[in-house]
Image: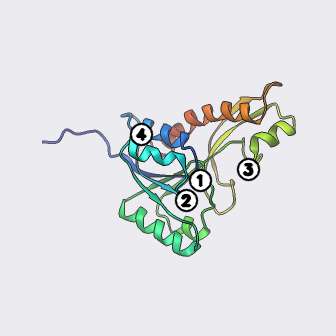
Amino acid sequence: MKKSTGPEKTKTAVFISGKGSNLKNLIRCSRIKNYPFSVNLIISNTIKAKGLKYSNIFNIEKKIIKYDKKIKTDNKILKVLKQRKIKLICLAGFMKILSKNFIKKFNGKILNIHPSLLPKYKGLNTHFRAINNKEKFAGCSVHYVNSKLDSGKIILQRRVKISSKDNHKSLEKKVLKVEHSIYPDAIKKILN
């Protein structure tokens, strides 16, 4: 007889394009009993994403999907998500913009983590822009994905103090550390 493992965890796909440090962190958290999600699928738009190695390390299915024809690509991903019964998508350094059609058709929640205190500094080069504008604080935001770039409802935000010694690289490191604690907390918040 199988031992009951508590409530069913929400099946999650993580979309990446790069190193995958948020992915690695989400996988680790998902294996802790009180986190209500499991990472069941890793999707990348490039075979060069270093984070794909976590698929082998943690034995999680991965798919590399080329973004050439938007509608065809959308439908291909949606089909895979449906087959795997995925109910949550976490974008983690995913460098493609999901189409309105995809967002509308996906039958679940889509979250993104962004390295700024939204609505400030949507898009790229957030740390560089924050330092250039002599901001006192930077930070990160976890938000729902809608059809406008970095504009969905904010779930959680956390601030990081910018010191006079910070450059965009050191600030990126500081913010990334905070991203790792805030992303799983945001997922917990919406699923519990």
Residue 73 horizontal side relative to residue 35, left or right: right
Q: Nearer the viewer, mark 1 or mark 2?
A: 2
Could you tell me which residue is drawn at 69 percent across and 58 percent down?
149
Q: CA distance from mark 4 to mark 1?
A: 19 Å
**First along the sequence among labels 4 and 2:** 4
**Residue 94 horizontal/vertical position (percent):** 59, 53
User: Which residue does the numbered mark 2 point to in the structure image?
Assistant: 45
Q: Which residue is mark 1?
A: 94
Mark 3 residue element: loop
**Quarter of the image containing the N terminus?**
top left
Write the residue at 61% across / 68% down. Answer: 100
Which secondary structure lies at badge 1?
loop
Q: What amino acid is labelled 1 in the image?
A: Phe
Question: Which residue ends up furthest to the left in the rendered image?
Answer: 1
Is the Cβ of the residue at disc 1 closer than 8 Å to that at disc 2?
yes
| Residue annotated with mark 3 | 124
Badge 2 density bin: few <14, some 14–19, many ≥20, Cα 10 Å: some
Mark 4 or mark 3: which is in front? 3
**Nearer the observer, 184 or 40:** 40
The picture places residue 25, in percent across and down from the top left corner, at 49, 37
Residue highlighted by disc 4: 30
